[in-house]
Image: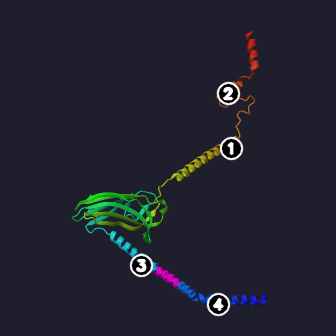
Amino acid sequence: MFSLLKKLLFLLLLVLPAVITITNEGNIVAYAQEDEVESEEDDIIEDDDEVNVADGTGVEVETTEGEEEEEEEEEAKGSPDADTIILFTKPTGTGAELPAGKLVEFLVGFTNNGDKDFVLDAIDASFRYPMDFSFYIQNFTAIPYNRAVKPRQEATVMYSFFPAEAFAGRPLGLTINLAYHDADGNVFVEPVFNQTVSIVEIDEGMDGETFFLYVFMLAFGVLLLVAGHHFLSSFGRKKASKKPLMEMGTNKKDGVDYDWLPKEVLDDLKKTPRQSPQQRKTKRIASSK
């Protein structure tokens, strides 16, 4: 009996999976198909998104960049009824060389040749990469003017900036723009200067380091002169001390030199016997008695 139950259980275990598979076959296939359809739809959607994003981004970027460039080109043109000119006053010249760390000043002249009023809005300047003027290196502050220029009149505005000392010895692109508008509201941005310039380092002659170097050299020269004078003086004293001294009158017995006396005096002295002071004293005493 136990063995029969065991066989029946074994058969049930073998048949049950088959029955479950047959019963749920349609659902399983449907699930599989749904999963495949969903995955395909996701792939299609992802592909469409990628294509749309890629195509859209590419077109938009190209279109935006092109539009921006066109707009910049259109904005970077001045009015045909206006003339501009630039004059560098510090340093004077064409502006091809600018001093590093020093003030740069220039004047911009504006002439209204039309029949409408113009208003000078502002001036701005910037350093650009010389190989690509669209790449900014240093921007300077824009100075607003809001100055009206009547027809057939002229106006002059000034602008100044300081090139950084770090740019010394480098060529840079300098762009100076004048923004203005007319009475109809048309805005113009005219590049009055757009060239490559050289930033040079100015040698001011004597700085603090050079001054102290000259002071040190002067003090060293004075010290050498004092030392040389002291050495020559001591050498002269030593040479003078080694020179033999002349002795006068050593050949005379009494140590008196009679050569300078006249001959008559010498003859009288020779006739008169010489006496010592003691003898003369004794003689005077004897004569007084």
Residue at label 2?
A: 266
Q: Which tag, 1 or 3, sits closer to the chain's start?
A: 3
Residues at marks 1 and 3 touching, judged by CB atoms closer than 8 Å:
no
Q: Where in the figure is residue 217, as x and y percent of width and height?
A: 57, 51
Secondary structure under badge 3? helix
Secondary structure under badge 1? helix
Residue 44 lies in the magenta-colored region: yes
Query: Type of residue at label 4?
Result: Ala
Marks 4 and 1 sit apart, C-alpha to C-alpha, by 139 Å
Closer-to-camera residue (185/119): 185
Name the residue at the front extreme.
1
- Which residue is depicted at the point 49% across and 61% down? 166
- Which residue is depicted at the point 73% across and 14% down? 284
Marks 2 and 4 sit apart, C-alpha to C-alpha, by 179 Å
Q: In the drawing, what numbered circle is on residue 18?
A: 4
Query: Type of residue at label 1?
Result: Lys
Q: Which residues are magenta?
A: 37-51
Q: In the drawing, what numbered circle is on residue 279?
A: none
Q: Which tag, 4 or 1, sits closer to the chain's start?
A: 4
Q: Where in the figure is residue 274, as x and y percent of width and height?
A: 74, 23
Residue 114 lies in the magenta-colored region: no
Closer-to-camera residue (77/230): 77
